[in-house]
């Protein structure tokens, strides 16, 4: 089972529009909803909705400045996804299993 | 931004395998055998040789670093914006071999998260999207 936190991260980033918004924040730094909307290809309310999902997953943070809200990417939230050591350990264990199966077949 | 600049980690898998090193070496170095347990590939056991490993989720770019027949095989493993190194070591035992795999060079810092977020993640996340769609 995937822990809830992972689940939320995965689901947040699985949507292409949401992912594009997050990637834009990673690449270009802080942005307002208006600036994000100009390039997102969807309406401002839709962008706001996506930002709310990203915020719940801890992937973005908002900062109010006068009447404008600036959003920034929280790269630390990606840590569970970039835990390469545990992902790769699982990968290699399964490949060792397959290697051993192959070696048995090579005997015959 | 006060995190350490680059903390490197490694994955190590080690097993006693009831087959001689020579035979395991074949499985590690012959393309058609590698394909059976690892991935499709165009491997060649020549130092400096570039090859890649291909899976449905993407491609791993590699370059052979060390070839010591029946003992040591090492190659770079470059995927999703991350360069790492895989090293295989074979040691004969009374009943077969000890096979050790070390996959080293995982930086666990923010720079890597950033690099990932802006590069190879797109490919990874596209696969993720399909997985999430499947699990509903």
Image (tube, coloured by chain):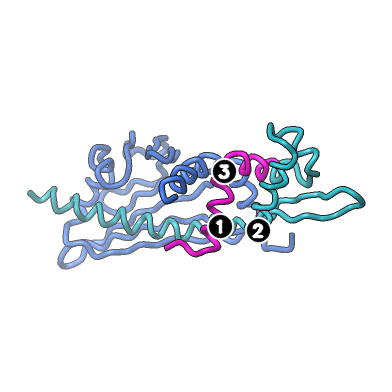
Estimate how packed mark 2 is, as few (under 14), some (14 to 19) or many (20 or more) residues with alpha carbons within 10 Å: few
Disc 1: which chain? Answer: A
Q: Which chain is blue?
A: B
Q: Does the magenta stretch mainly form a helix, a strand or a loop?
A: helix
Mark 2 and mark 1 in contact? Answer it, CB < 8 Å.
yes
Q: Which residue is mark 2?
A: A56
Across and down, in percent, residue B25 comes to 24, 49
Q: What kind of element bears circle 1? A: helix
Q: Name the side, left or right, on which B95 lies relative to B55.
A: left
Q: Which mark is residue B49?
A: none
Q: Which residues are magenta?
A: A1-24
Name the residue furthest front.
A45
Query: Marks 2 and 1, how far apart in space?
Result: 8 Å
Q: Earlier in the sequence, mark 2 or mark 1?
A: 1
Q: Chain of mark 3?
A: A
Local SS, label 2: helix
Task: Look at the image and give the colour of chain A.
Answer: cyan
The chain holding disc 2 is: A
Residue that label 1 marks:
A8
Percent coordinates x, y for residue A93 in the rendering: 33, 59
């Amino acid at each position: 089972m995937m822990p809830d936190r992972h689940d939320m991260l995965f689901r947040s980033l699985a949507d292409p529009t949401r992912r594009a918004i997050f990637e834009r924040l990673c690449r270009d730094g802080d942005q307002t909803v208006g600036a994000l909307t100009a390039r997102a290809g969807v309406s401002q309310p839709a962008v706001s909705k996506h930002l709310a999902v990203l915020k719940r997953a801890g992937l973005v943070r908002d900062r109010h400045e006068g009447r404008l809200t600036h959003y920034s990417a929280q790269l630390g939230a990606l840590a569970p996804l970039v835990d390469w050591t545990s992902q790769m350990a699982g990968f290699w264990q399964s490949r060792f299993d397959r290697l051993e199966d192959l070696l048995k077949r090579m005997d015959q | 931004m006060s995190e350490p600049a680059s903390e490197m980690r490694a994955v190590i898998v080690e097993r006693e395998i009831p087959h001689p090193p020579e035979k395991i070496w074949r499985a590690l170095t012959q393309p058609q055998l590698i394909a059976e347990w690892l991935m499709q590939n165009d491997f060649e056991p020549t130092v400096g040789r570039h090859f890649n490993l291909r899976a449905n989720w993407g491609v791993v770019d590699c370059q052979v670093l060390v070839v010591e027949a029946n003992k040591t095989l090492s190659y770079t493993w470059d995927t999703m914006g991350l360069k790492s190194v895989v090293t295989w070591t074979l040691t004969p035992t009374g009943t077969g071999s000890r096979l050790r795999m070390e996959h080293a060079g995982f930086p666990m810092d923010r720079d890597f998260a950033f690099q990932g977020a802006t590069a190879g993640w797109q490919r990874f996340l596209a696969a993720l999207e399909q997985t999430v769609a499947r699990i509903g």
